[in-house]
Image: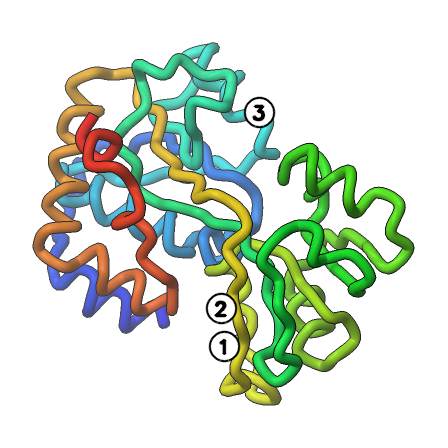
Amino acid sequence: MRALLSAVCLLCFIIPLSAKELDVVVGWNKPPYVISQEHTGFEVDLVRAILAEMGYGLSPIYVPFGRTARLLKDDAVDIGLTLNPAHTVDQSILSEPYIVYQNVVVTRADRELTIDSIDDLKGKSVIAFQTAQSVLGEDFGRTLASQTTYIEMARQDRQVDMLMRGSVDVAILDRNIFNYFKSTNSAYAEDATVFHELFPISPYSAAIPDPALRAKFNATLRLFIEDGRYQLLLDEYKLDNLLHKLPEAEMAK
């Protein structure tokens, strides 16, 4: 994958040996967005390519998610990834959105389950990502809290495996994380599934305190989207492009 990414993504980038390395805070391992042991993943590769086009190198710093805002506040890093106005960070330093996540309810198509609301999860065995009860809204938390057939799990590859092998009726996780892990297992990669979109999309930006750097990042991100390089990288990781779900005003803030 790495060789193909280099060729496809970006045909492109010869970085001078003297290029300045920017310190970029990245969350811990979260395939396919961040694959920390390989210094890759969609977000890492995208931001590395954007910075290369701008004439910079990327020096990743992997930290627990909650530490990103503190490092930015202390002026200890140049860029922080995967942030939005819900986080404790100055909104004025956020770039235009570069990635959109969406948690979905996933079922196997052959089960023919109808799930149009949170209420429809009652009586079903449900596996969700860790902290789902606290982040998916009060209605979700209230409905699932007392359900003995509801569990949360940190390992999202296991979530996918349990759904696809029929151990649970429903899995709840980010749609692209689901697609990534499903596609890597030949036992069920081709099995049909259904996404039930009960939850809103979540756009994420990069926090870039330097206004000139932020403006250049935004302009280069727009170029990547317009000329197709953004989509090529999504395709390489088998990710859905959810940017089209954003209001135009949010895409060009």
* Residue drawn where x is 53% and y is 46% of the image: 199
Residue identifier under label 2: 179
The amino acid marked with disc number 2 is Asn
CA gap, disc 2 to disc 3?
Answer: 28 Å
Where residue 98 sits, quadrant-wise, is: top left
Asked whether, in this view, residue 105 is left or right of residue 212, the answer is right
Identify the image quadrant of the C terminus: top left
Residue identifier under label 1: 183
Residues at discs 1 and 2 in contact (Cβ within 8 Å): yes
Residue identifier under label 3: 67
Identify the image quadrant of the N terminus: bottom left
* Residue drawn where x is 38% and y is 69% of the image: 238
* Residue drawn where x is 62% and y is 62% of the image: 115
Asked whether, in this view, residue 252 is left or right of residue 113, the answer is left
Where residue 134 sits, quadrant-wise, is: top right
The amino acid marked with disc number 3 is Arg
Packing grade of label 2 (10 A; few <14, some 14-19, many >=20) is: some
Residues at discs 2 and 3 in contact (Cβ within 8 Å): no
Residue at disc 3, secondary structure: helix
Of badges 1 and 3, the one in the foreground is 1
User: Looking at the image, which is closer to me, 212 or 91?
Assistant: 91
Q: Is residue 37 visible?
A: no
The amino acid marked with disc number 1 is Ser
